[in-house]
Amino acid sequence: MTRRPFILRNPSILIFLALLAIFTAAVTLMSEAFGTAMISTSFVKTLGKTLCLCLVALAMDLVWGYCGILSLGHFAFFGLGGYMIGMWLMYARTEIIVTESLANAAIPPTDQEIVDAIGTQIFGVVGSSDFPPIWAFAHSLPLQLLMVVLVPGLLALVFGWLAFRSRVTGVYLSILTQAMTLALSLYLFQNESGLRGNNGLSGLQNLPGVAASQAVVSVWFLWASALALGLGYLLCAWVVSGKFGSVVRGIRDDEARVRFLGYSVEGYKLFIFTLTAIIAGIAGALYYPQAGIINPGEVAPIASIYLAVWVAIGGRGRLYGAVIGAALVSLISTWFTGGLVPSVPLGFYTIDWVDWWLVLLGLSFVLVTLFAPKGIGGLFDLVSGRFAPDRHGADYGPDKGSLQEEEGRG
């Protein structure tokens, strides 16, 4: 008998991809560039950025919801991906400006003079004109795209190898990931970091050498973000399926037992940790050209905590739950913090939702944790009737003495 393709054996993937395609097509047809202009260019960018946040939420759900590693540092990988592509965007855009300004000079500039002028334009804000070593590949788009994958991946590989080989788990591992993020953030704030310190990288929304308007570029990035999210969802669904996925979930539920069965727990955890860091880096590389700017504040530990909150609200251990949580919280956050919700005067005090949004987010997280631990994704379980079978202590397997239901719960 011919085995059905992976996607056909998982209809939820087809449903997700179909909904994503419909959403992307609808936004395109309502955009200013290719449609009826019912949706503004700024909101198209917001939707594109939301898709990127959904992608990094998938990574977080894979490492936390399925593997049980509560990483409070995955937004650092997201930011590193943004910095890597931002370096090329700034270099290429500045190179065009410098070349055009020197084109009419009496004596044609040398290549070194052009490079020096580019360095002055980029690093003059931090009192320098020399390119740091980390900008060695900034002139090449293919190499910087490779850095988008390599830099977050190598950092996660080294950090994960050191942490997992020492068998650091639980809250201690979470603290270590947060410490890593804080150290990276503090380093980037320094002017000596080579990434313009607190000023960050700006003007990233302008694609070098592309004459298209921002309305068109925003739709292009929407398409790229949707494609990345679709492929990311497919990859994550494939990873958590089959025997590999069963081992990963086993590590989450009982790491000691999985190790006793002979599996290389550290190897599985390192693979998941590195893979999700790469996914987060790709998401950041697509996000920040739409945001237009990136600075060290984007890598602060609080951002990774927000990421965990999104996944918890959506429902960890469910890929679609992570997407729902990230999309819902991101769009509601834009609504509240954008001044679109009117303030509520109480006489003695006026509730300004821009200031109170974080309180609402924290309260939502507490309520979900206490009363709906499965998150929004748990509602789909109720609708679809996905309940665990009531075995009443019967054997799990066909033979007498197989794992009992009570032991399985333990």
Image (cartoon, rainbow, N blue to C red):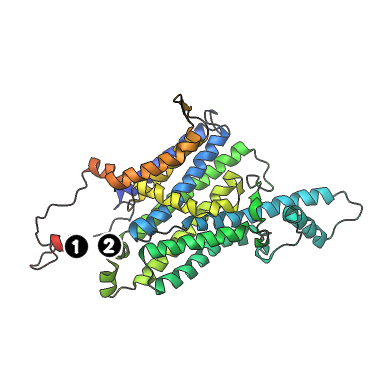
* Residue 18 falls left or right of residue 112: left
Residue 82 appears in view: yes
User: Which quarter of the picture shows residue 363?
Assistant: top left
> Where 215 sits versus 141, above or below?
above
> Where 166 sits versus 336, above or below?
below
User: Which quarter of the picture shows residue 291?
Assistant: top right
Q: Position of residue 187 (x, y in %)?
A: 60, 61
Report the disc number at residue 410: 1
For the residue labelled by badge 1, is the local secondary structure a helix, a strand or a loop?
loop
User: Which quarter of the picture shows residue 217?
Assistant: top right
- Of residues 43 and 241, which is closer to you in this image? 43
Q: Position of residue 119 (x, y in %)?
A: 75, 57
Report the disc number at residue 138: none
In this figure, which residue is indicated by the disc labeled 2?
253
Residue 376 appears in view: no
Q: Disc 2 versus disc 1: distance between alpha carbons?
A: 10 Å
Estimate how packed mark 1 is, as few (under 14), some (14 to 19) or many (20 or more) residues with alpha carbons within 10 Å: few
What residue is at 87 percent from the left and 48 percent from the top?
A: 104
For the residue labelled by badge 2, is the local secondary structure a helix, a strand or a loop?
helix
Estimate how packed mark 2 is, as few (under 14), some (14 to 19) or many (20 or more) residues with alpha carbons within 10 Å: some
* Residue 108 falls left or right of residue 409: right
Q: Amino acid at mark 1?
A: Gly
- Of residues 139 and 188, which is closer to you in this image? 188
What residue is at 85 percent from the left and 57 percent from the top?
A: 109
Mark 2 touches mark 1? (CB < 8 Å): no
- Of residues 334 and 321, which is closer to you in this image? 334
> Where 43 sits versus 230, above or below?
above
